[in-house]
Image (spheres, grey):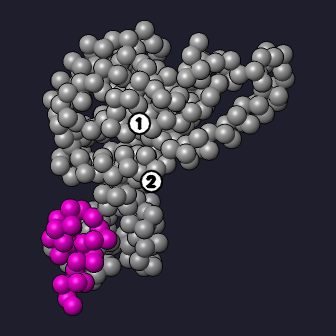
Amino acid sequence: MSKKNATEQTNQQSVQLDEWSSLEIIKFMNQEDEKIAKTVNEALPIIAHAVDAIVERWKMGGRCFVVGAGTSGRLGMVDAVELGPTFSIEQDSWIGLVAGGKEAMLQSLEQTEDDEKEIVAELKRYSFGESDVIIGVTASGSTPFVLAAVQYANELSALTIGISNNKDTALSAICDYGIEAATGAEVIRGSTRLKAGTSQKMILNMLSTATMVRLGKVYQNEMVDMKLINKKLVKRAVQAMMNITDIPEQAALKALRENAFDLKSALFTVLTDGTTKDASYYLAQANGHLKKAVQQYFKKGM
């Protein structure tokens, strides 16, 4: 077996795993997990470049498609689904595509990871184009389903990003940004839902979160672009207003009501003492970036 495919190698430290106690097993798993942050840390520069590139495509109206099979595909889907309520992005703007389709989220359909034609057909159904982004995720760096998606994206001059867990992978070789977190041999040989999967979740979180922050969907470290669709989120919005503006709870709730529960608009009016009409104008001028909108409002008065 190629040394490059370390995720399929035997972990010599756990060859007696089946003889260990429960505590011994989980202690060893914990020790192995401690190594993951270091491998991700080594990839931070290229992750940051990938974020910058995603932001530019997003401003052009591009969408992000996260493509993977098995654990990798499911992780991409989970991250994508969370972005709607958290950052109020439009439906079908950050999309998870897993081999086997939505059924694969609930059952193992790993045989579909070799289906190159299906992923290309799926991307065509979405009218995938030049301004869009593919984030391919595969521990081995060689899954046909993912490679086919990236190759198709390259043909259209779209942005391509790869996340893999080996060195010098086939995926990285064909991507604009090849992110490699070499997590090494798994506790159970080849079970990449473990260390490899954990590192992928970390990297996907970084790509999506940093992109949303750069796009102005966070003020300070508060989520200010939430869809206030339930009591918990309204409560969170009220607390965000209190944290950012130092106004009391009832004043925060009043400002939200006066701005039709649009948190950015409510914050703008409190921070600037401007009107809801001002909020609408300056937020539009700043492409929804609250801090820039506030700065432009005060700059106007100088």
Tell me whether the residue at label 2 lies in contact with that at label 1, contact meaning CB atoms closer than 8 angstroms: no
Q: Quadrant of residue 187?
A: top right
Q: Position of residue 285 (x, y in %)?
A: 16, 68
Judge by depth and name the residue closer to the eye, 288 or 273.
Answer: 288
Q: Do we see residue 110 in this rendering?
A: yes
Residue at figure coordinates x 27%, y 14% from the top left: 118
Q: Nearer the viewer, mark 2 or mark 1?
A: 1
Residue at figure coordinates x 59%, y 41% from the top left: 39
SS at mark 1 in the image:
strand
Give the left or right position of residue 232, taking residue 224 as reference: right
- The residue identified by callout 2 is 232
| Amino acid identity at mark 1 | Gly
Judge by depth and name the residue closer to the eye, 298 or 4.
Answer: 4
Give the left or right position of residue 58, taking residue 25 as reference: left
What are the residue bounds of the magenta stretch?
A: 278-302
Q: Do we see residue 135 in this rendering?
A: no
Give the left or right position of residue 71, taking residue 288 as reference: right
- The residue identified by callout 1 is 178
Q: Position of residue 97 (x, y in %)?
A: 33, 26
Image quarter in which the C terminus is found: bottom left
Magenta stretch, overall SS: helix
Image quarter in which the N terminus is found: top right
